[in-house]
C-alpha cells in the first residue's frame, strides 16, 4: 500500500468511527443520571456530599455556609426529573433550590425554590422564570403532602413550545412560548442544572419575621434519582440534531386535557401567589404574558 491509499483508508475508518460515535451520542439521553458523573460541587467546602456511588446527593447548611452543585454539561431543552427530600423539622429561613440557568446579565433561568418553615408549618414552593435577564415572574404554591417526610419528584420540561413544572407528575405551572406576541422565551441560551441549600431568612420567612434557628444546624436536604433526557449543548451544537425531535416525547409535549385539569386543581387549591394577578405590584399594567389570551394559540 502506498502512503496515499493507506492515508485515505485510515481517513475512511476514522470517519466511520466518528459516525458511529455520533450515532450513539444521538441515541443517548445526554447525561448519565449520576451525581458523581454529571455534577461538580461548586461551593460549600464538604457540605455537599454524594452517597452510594453518586446515586444520592446531600446538601447541608450551617451558620458558616450552605452548599451547591452545578452540572458539568449544559443543555438546550430537556426533561429533567429529580427526587428531593427537604430539610425536616424547623427549616425556617432555609431555601433549597433546583434550577436551570444560563450565564451572564441577559441570562435565562427556570427555578424551583423550596422555602422552609417552622416545624409543622407548610413549605412554600417558589417558582420563577427569567428571560434575557428579567425575572419577576413568581408563582408560589403549597404542597398537598409533607415534602420532608419522603422523596418526591420535581420535574422540568423545557421545549421550544413551553416550560412546564411538575410535582410528582402533576403540572403546577406552564409558561408558553409567546414569542409571536413579542414576549421573550428561553430558547437560545444553553443552561446548566443547579442545586443548592442556603440561608435566606431575610427573604424567605415573610420578610424576615422568623429567624433561622441555628441550634438545629446542620440542615440537610437530599436529592436522588436524577434523570435527564436533554439536548446537550456543546461548542454550538445540540446532541439532539434536527431529526431527533420526534424521538423525545417531551420535545413537543404540551398539556393534554387531563393535565390541564390537574393544573387547574393545583392552581385553585394550592397556589398562594401569582404575579399575573398582582395588580398592586404592576400598577402600569400586568406583564404582557399575563394578558395574552392563550386559548387562541393552538
Ligand atoms: C409558613 O407557615 C405560615 C403559617 O402557616 C404560612 O403563612 C407561610 O406561608 C409558611 N411559609 C413560609 C415560607 O413562611
Image (cartoon, helix red, strand yellow):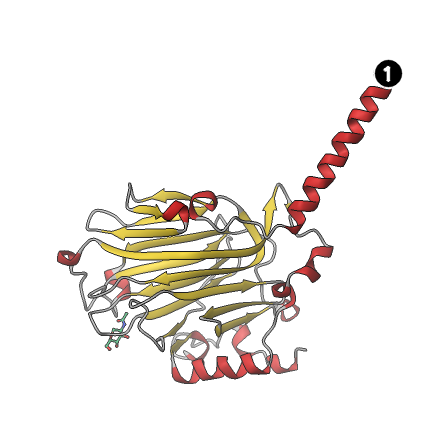
Question: What residue do we see at 31% from left, 63% from top?
Answer: 86
Q: Report which residue position mark 1 lands on.
A: 1
Question: What residue do we see at 28% from left, 50% from top?
Answer: 66
Q: Examine the rendering and report whether any part of residue 172 can be seen.
A: no
Q: Quadrant of residue 205?
A: bottom left
Q: Quadrant of residue 200?
A: bottom left
270 versus 111 height, above or below: below
Check the picture and name the quadrant holding the C terminus.
Answer: bottom right
Check the picture and name the quadrant holding the N terminus.
Answer: top right
Q: Position of residue 243 (x, y in %)?
A: 73, 56
Q: Nearer the viewer, residue 126 or 290?
A: 126
Q: Position of residue 14 (x, y in %)?
A: 74, 30
Q: Quadrant of residue 268?
A: bottom left
Q: Nearer the viewer, residue 279 or 110?
A: 110
**Residue 41 left/right relative to 17:** left
Q: Position of residue 64 (x, y in %)?
A: 21, 47
Q: Residue furthest top?
A: 2
Question: What residue do we see at 30% from left, 44% from top?
Answer: 44
Q: Examine the rendering and report whether any part of residue 239 can be seen.
A: yes
Ligand 1 visible in quadrant: bottom left
144 versus 25 height, above or below: below
Label 1 near ligand 1 (CB < 8 Å)? no
**Residue 222 left/right relative to 3:** left
**Label 1 crowd bin: few (<14), some (14–19), many (20+), radius 10 Å:** few
Where disc 1 sits, the SS reads loop
Question: What residue do we see at 36% from left, 65% from top?
Answer: 151
Q: Position of residue 154 (x, y in %)?
A: 44, 65
Please tell me how many numbered marks the rendered image carries. 1
Q: Nearer the viewer, residue 178 or 13?
A: 13
263 versus 128 height, above or below: below
Amino acid at each position: 500500500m502506498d502512503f496515499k491509499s493507506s492515508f485515505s483508508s485510515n481517513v475512511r475508518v476514522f470517519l466511520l468511527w466518528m459516525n458511529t460515535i455520533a450515532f450513539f451520542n444521538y441515541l443517548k439521553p445526554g447525561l448519565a443520571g449520576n451525581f458523581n458523573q454529571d455534577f461538580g460541587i461548586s461551593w460549600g467546602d464538604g457540605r455537599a456530599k454524594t452517597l452510594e456511588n453518586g446515586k444520592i446527593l446531600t446538601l447541608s447548611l450551617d451558620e458558616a455556609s450552605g452548599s451547591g452543585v452545578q452540572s458539568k454539561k449544559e443543555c438546550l431543552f430537556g426533561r429533567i426529573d429529580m427526587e428531593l427530600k427537604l430539610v425536616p423539622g424547623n427549616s425556617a429561613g432555609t431555601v433549597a433550590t433546583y434550577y436551570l440557568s444560563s450565564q451572564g446579565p441577559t441570562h435565562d433561568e427556570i427555578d424551583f425554590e423550596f422555602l422552609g418553615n417552622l416545624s409543622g408549618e407548610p413549605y412554600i414552593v417558589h417558582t420563577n422564570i427569567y428571560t434575557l435577564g428579567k425575572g419577576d415572574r413568581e408563582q408560589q404554591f403549597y404542597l398537598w403532602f409533607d415534602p420532608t417526610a419522603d422523596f418526591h419528584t420535581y420535574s422540568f420540561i423545557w421545549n421550544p413550545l413551553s416550560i412546564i413544572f411538575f410535582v410528582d407528575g402533576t403540572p403546577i405551572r406552564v409558561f408558553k412560548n409567546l414569542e409571536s406576541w413579542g414576549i421573550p422565551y428561553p430558547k437560545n441560551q444553553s443552561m446548566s442544572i443547579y442545586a443548592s441549600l442556603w440561608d435566606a431568612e431575610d427573604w424567605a420567612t415573610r420578610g424576615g419575621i422568623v429567624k433561622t434557628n441555628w441550634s438545629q444546624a446542620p440542615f440537610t436536604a437530599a436529592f436522588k434519582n436524577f434523570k435527564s433526557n436533554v439536548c446537550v449543548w456543546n461548542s454550538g451544537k445540540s446532541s439532539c440534531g434536527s431529526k431527533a425531535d420526534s424521538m423525545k416525547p417531551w420535545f413537543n409535549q404540551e398539556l393534554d386535557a387531563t393535565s390541564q385539569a390537574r393544573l387547574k386543581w393545583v392552581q385553585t387549591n394550592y397556589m398562594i401567589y401569582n404575579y399575573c394577578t398582582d395588580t398592586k405590584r404592576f400598577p402600569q399594567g400586568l406583564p404582557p404574558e399575563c394578558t395574552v389570551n392563550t386559548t387562541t394559540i393552538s
